[in-house]
Image (cartoon, grey):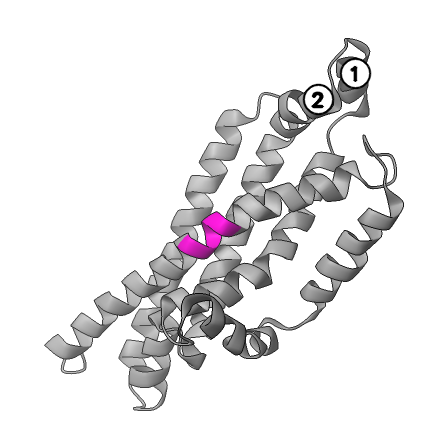
Amino acid sequence: MDFFTPTVLKAMGTATVETLQMVVISGIITVVIGLILGILLHVTGKGGLTPVRWFNVILSAIIVNITRSIPFAILMVALIPFSALVVGTSLGPIAASVSLTIGTIPFFARLVETALRDVSAGKVDAALVMGSTKMQTIRKVLVPEAMPGIIAAVTTTVVTLIGYSAMAGLVGGGGLGRMAYTYGYTRYNMPIMITTIIIIVVLVQLVQIVGDIIARKIDHR
C-alpha cells in the first residue's frame, strides 16, 4: 500500500473522472451524429427508401471508410491542431473528446447501418403501402424495429471509447491512460498499473451489462 499515497489516490480519482468525462462527451455526440449518418447510409444506399448513389458514395466510401481506415493513434495525433482550434486547447479531456468523437462516429454509423439493414423489408413496405411518408417510415418503423441492434451498437461504441480514451491519455488527454503511463510505466509502479487496468475493466463490464439489459428489454421480436 506504500505505492498508494494520498497524492496517488487523489490522482487516481481525478483520472477516473477525466476518463468518464471523455467517454460521456464523445459518446453523446457520437450517438447523435452517428445515428443520423447511419440512417443516411442505409436510406440512400442500394435498396434504401431513397437511393442516391453519388451521395451514398461520398458518405460511405469517402467519409466513413477513409476515416475508419486510419489507426486511431495516428488520427488522434493528426487532430491535435483541430482540437486546439475547436476547444481552444490541445490538452485535457475536453480536447481529447474531439478526436474521440471523430474517430468513433464512422464506426458507430456503420453499426447503425447494419442494424437498420436487418429490419424486415416487409415491415417497411407495409408502412409505405398504408400511406406513411418516408420520414414517418424511418421514425415509426425503421428505427424502432432496429432499436435492439442500435442499443447493442451504442454499447459496443462506448466500450471502444473507453479503450480509445486510454490511448488519448498518452498525448495529453488525461484520464486513466495518462495515470497508467505517468505513475505506472515511467515509475515502474506495477500496482498502480494493475489498478488502472482493473478500473477500466470494471467500466467496460458495467457498460456491457447495462447495454445488454436495455437491449433485451426493448427487443420484442
* Image coordinates for residue 66, horizontal then vertical, percent: 74, 65
* Image coordinates for residue 191, horizontal then vertical, percent: 27, 78
Q: Is residue 9 visible?
A: yes
Q: Which mark is residue 137?
A: 2
| Secondary structure at numbered mark 2 | helix
* Image coordinates for residue 161, horizontal then vertical, percent: 49, 59
Q: Which residues fall within the magenta stretch?
A: 25-29
C-alpha gap between disc 2 and disc 1: 7 Å
* In the image: residue 43, left or right of residue 27: right
The answer to whether the residue labelled 2 contacts the one labelled 1, judged by CB atoms less than 8 Å apart, is yes
> Which three-letter amino acid code belongs to the residue tagged 2?
Thr
Reply above or below: 39 against 187: above
The residue where tag 1 is placed is 128
Decide: few, some or many residues near mark 1? Use Cα within 10 Å; few <14, some 14-19, many ≥20. some
* Image coordinates for residue 165, horizontal then vertical, percent: 45, 67
Question: Looking at this view, is 2 or 27 the one in front?
Answer: 27
Which SS does the magenta portion mostly show?
helix
Q: Earlier in the sequence, mark 2 or mark 1?
A: 1
Q: Image point 43% across, 76% down: which residue? A: 90
Q: Quadrant of the C terminus?
A: top right
Corner quadrant of residue 7: bottom left
* In the image: residue 151, left or right of residue 122: left
Reply above or below: 109 against 122: below
